[in-house]
């Protein structure tokens, strides 16, 4: 039987808002059927990592955990029944993969509702205790353990690690949002709220999908300049305009109607009410970024009077990972994805990277392992 290192260095959160500890975490020495052991090569940092570290997520987190969840790893060992990924591609030792949170396939949400991201028995990477086997369920770690009920998707050879890791959370969330929305028509004006990583990626997808016009709202100006590079036809700064001015501008671009589609990627509760106002009558509003504990006040009559479709989009399963990876593979020479990757850090520099992300000094930093 193949043996592995007994421990893996990993970044562990034991207390919210406290410095992250670099610890030696056990590596499982036997692989059960359906599992894969990977050598993690890259894990990008997501805003959710910062929220977890700060203890500000709406989701319950039972510490201690290995932080990080946007990872790409190279297969070093495979349990029985793992010769293909979740979309039918062959797998072998040495291949690079990304992997999903688990879905049991047997609960109401997996089977009847067909919403596996809502699985009531799901286990989520970065949210599982690292002091309970199989331990290695977070991304800022030398080794990662792929659970039997996790989807796994082979990374195309043409996609570099930093873009593959980004595809495993930020971009899969965007792809899932577009699946929730449905088609983008060539007559549509799409407004993207937010110029962070998800907003930039959504700007690119909306443009490539054939939208007539893509308008990105956000800040600071450097992010809006990137949004133009990602395909925005129009950008509007939230730092230099008021709610009323943004609404007037969007209406002016749409013959007074408002946006056909509005997509929220900001994470700021106040953006929700503005999104409702920006959408035209009969339009669609897809909400993705609202995972924090904040609240806001809205007029529910807006939804009724406008006959709006208000859609929540949470996470994404293997299909979304596969679509994100293939979008990168097919469009990386026309969409400047690499400009989103700002800082590169070692495992020992996780605290520095998280603090810089918290202070909006980075767009998408990566931890290279």
Image: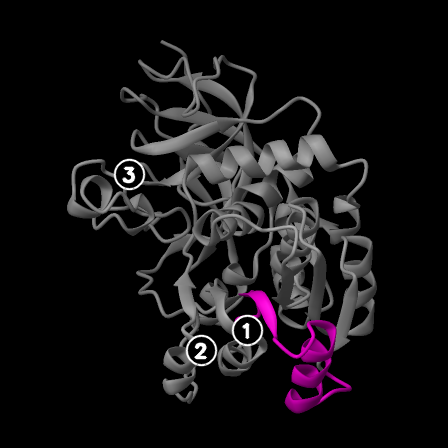
SS at badge 3: loop
Q: What mark, if any, has residue 133 been given in the picture?
A: 3
Instruction: Give the residue number, with chain letter if any, for mark 2.
Output: 306
At x 73% / y 80%, what residue is drawn? 249
SS at badge 1: strand
Do residues under tags 3 and 2 come within 8 Å of each other at their CB atoms? Answer: no
> Which quadrant of the structure image shows residue 132?
top left
Mark 1 or mark 2, which is nearer the start of the sequence?
A: 1
What's the magenta region? Answer: 239-267
Instruction: Give the residue number, with chain letter if any, for mark 1.
Output: 279
At x 73% / y 67%, what residue is drawn? 361
Q: Quadrant of the N terminus?
A: top left
Q: Is residue 193 left or right of residue 63?
A: right
Do residues under tags 2 and 1 come within 8 Å of each other at their CB atoms? Answer: yes
Q: Nearer the viewer, residue 198 or 355?
A: 198
Residue 160 shows in the view: no
């Amino acid at each position: 039987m193949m043996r592995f290192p007994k421990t893996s260095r990993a970044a562990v959160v034991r207390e919210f808002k406290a410095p992250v500890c670099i610890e030696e975490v056990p590596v499982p020495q036997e692989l059960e059927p359906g599992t894969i052991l990977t050598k993690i090569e890259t894990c990008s940092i997501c805003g959710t990592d910062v929220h977890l570290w700060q203890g500000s997520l709406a989701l319950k987190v039972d510490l201690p955990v290995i932080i990080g969840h946007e990872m790409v790893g190279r297969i070093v060992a495979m349990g029985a029944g793992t010769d293909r990924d979740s979309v039918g591609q062959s797998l072998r030792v040495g291949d690079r993969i990304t992997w999903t949170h688990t879905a049991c396939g047997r609960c109401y949400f997996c089977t009847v509702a067909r919403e596996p991201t809502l699985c009531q028995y799901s286990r989520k990477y970065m949210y599982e205790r690292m002091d309970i086997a199989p331990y290695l369920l977070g991304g800022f770690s030398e080794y990662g353990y792929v659970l039997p009920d996790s989807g796994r998707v082979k990374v195309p050879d043409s996609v570099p690690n930093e873009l593959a890791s980004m595809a495993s959370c930020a971009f899969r969330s965007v792809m899932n949002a577009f699946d929730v929305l449905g088609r983008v028509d060539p007559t549509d004006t799409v407004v993207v709220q937010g110029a962070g990583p998800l907003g930039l990626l959504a700007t690119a997808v909306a443009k490539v999908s054939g939208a007539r016009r893509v308008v990105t709202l956000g800040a600071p100006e450097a992010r809006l300049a990137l949004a133009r590079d990602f395909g925005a036809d129009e950008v509007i700064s939230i730092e230099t305009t008021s709610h009323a001015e943004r609404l007037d501008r969007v209406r002016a671009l749409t013959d007074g109607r408002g946006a056909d589609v509005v997509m929220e990627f900001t994470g700021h509760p106040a953006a929700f009410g503005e999104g409702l106002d920006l959408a035209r009558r009969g339009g669609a509003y897809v909400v993705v970024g609202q995972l924090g504990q904040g609240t806001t006040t809205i007029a529910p009559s807006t939804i009724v009077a406008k006959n709006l479709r208000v859609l929540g989009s949470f996470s994404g399963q293997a299909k979304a990972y596969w679509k994100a990876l293939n979008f990168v593979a097919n469009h990386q020479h026309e969409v400047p994805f690499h400009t989103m990757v700002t800082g590169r850090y070692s495992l020992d520099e996780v605290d520095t990277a998280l603090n810089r992300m918290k202070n909006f000094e980075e767009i998408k930093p990566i931890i290279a392992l």
